[in-house]
């Protein structure tokens, strides 16, 4: 399906799961990509697995997920033990191809679409969190500010509920080309999908977002049997 993306198809990876039918769709599932701010979903998951949360932690999570606040992410990343703490959570969830970012640079967490799909599933529909904690995370992801609701949202139909976390970052080691990522869940009367789209090497942020949205729409069509 993603062959329709032309030459840009080498800059993207995708994993999509239909929770109603069990259908799994992947494209370049083992390719490594950086997450940029989509790594904040993993940070939130790690924090929400802790037995007790402070009001400050909850406020930081809201800022981090709904507004993609980097200072809040820095605080929470340090509280979970930075990469060492995140790696322990990743391994507990069965993620074997994910490497947390070095030091405080959580945005350079490297992963594959399939590994990230495991994390999204654990966070939003699995047993990694209690029902209450999962509801808290979903509430945050469904209230992301409007200018950060692109990406997988492009595959949604009118009336669907979209829980999303996007990432965007110009990468110095790639001549400041853009990393663009989008992960989350689309739920409606006739669908319940988990979607992960990872990409990189974009000359512009807008071009990267357009590619990710096109990939998401194509994945949605494929899940519905429309290719």
Image (tube, helix red, strand yellow):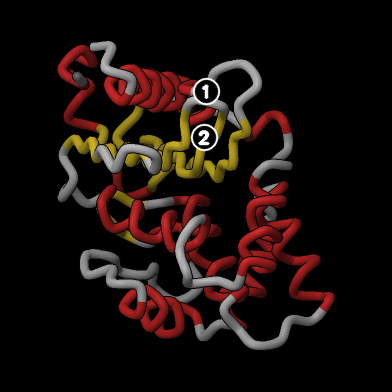
Quadrant containing the C terminus is top left
**Any mark on residue 186, and which?**
2
Q: Where is residue 187 in the image (x, y as percent from the top left)?
A: 54, 35
User: Residue, x 67% and y 42% (percent of image)?
Assistant: 142
Q: In which quarter of the image is residue 6?
A: top left
Image position of 217 with respect to 143: above or below: above
In-image side of 115 versus 195 (left or right)? left
Residue shown at 54% from the left, 68% from the top: 45
Quadrant of res 97: bottom left
- Seen at 17% across and 30% down, the residue is 10
Q: Is mark 1 on a helix, strand or loop?
A: loop
Say whether residue 173 is left or right of residue 77. left
**Where's residue 126, x and y in %?**
45, 63
Q: Which of 184 and 206 is in front in this view?
A: 184
Number of on-image labels: 2
Relative image position of residue 196 (x, y in whole percent): 37, 42
Which residue lies at the image location 50% right of the left edge and 61% below the top edge?
A: 123
Examine the rendering and report whether any part of residue 176 can be seen: no
User: Callout 2: few (<14), some (14-19), or many (20+) C-alpha neighbours within 10 Å?
Assistant: many
Sequence-wise, which precedes: disc 1 or disc 2?
Answer: 1
In the rendered image, the residue lying farthest to the right is 55
Q: Which of 93/20 is in front?
A: 20
Q: Position of residue 73 (x, y in %)?
A: 63, 65
SS class of the residue under badge 2? strand
User: Residue under circle 1?
Assistant: 156
Residue 62 as seen in the image, left or right of residue 114: right
User: What is the crowding at mark 1: few (fewer than 14 residues within 10 Å), some, or many (at least 20)?
Assistant: some
Q: Of 19 and 32, which appears nearest the observer?
A: 19
Q: Are marks 1 and 2 in contact (CB under 8 Å)?
A: yes
Q: Can residue 63 be seen in this view?
A: yes
- The answer to whether 114 is drawn above or below residue 200 in the figure is below
């Amino acid at each position: 399906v993603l062959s329709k993306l032309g030459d840009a198809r080498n800059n993207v990876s995708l994993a999509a799961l239909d929770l109603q039918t069990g259908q799994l769709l992947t494209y370049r599932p083992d390719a490594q990509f950086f997450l940029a701010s989509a790594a904040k979903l993993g940070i939130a998951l790690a924090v929400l697995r802790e037995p007790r949360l402070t009001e400050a932690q909850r406020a930081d999570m809201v800022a981090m997920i709904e507004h993609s606040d980097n200072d809040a992410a820095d605080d929470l990343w340090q509280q979970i033990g930075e990469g060492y703490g995140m790696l322990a959570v990743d391994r507990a969830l069965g993620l074997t191809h994910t490497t947390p970012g070095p030091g405080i640079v959580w945005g350079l967490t490297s992963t594959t679409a399939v590994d990230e799909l495991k994390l999204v599933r654990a966070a939003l529909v699995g047993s990694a969190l209690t029902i209450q904690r999962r509801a808290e995370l979903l509430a945050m992801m469904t209230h992301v500010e409007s200018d950060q609701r692109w990406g997988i949202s492009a595959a949604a139909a009118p009336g669907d509920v979209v829980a999303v976390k996007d990432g965007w970052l110009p990468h110095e080691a790639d001549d400041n080309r853009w990393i663009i990522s989008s992960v989350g869940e689309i739920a409606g009367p006739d669908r319940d999908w988990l979607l992960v789209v990872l990409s990189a090497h974009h000359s512009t942020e807008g071009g990267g977002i357009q590619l990710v949205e096109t990939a998401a729409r194509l994945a949605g069509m494929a899940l519905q049997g429309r290719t």
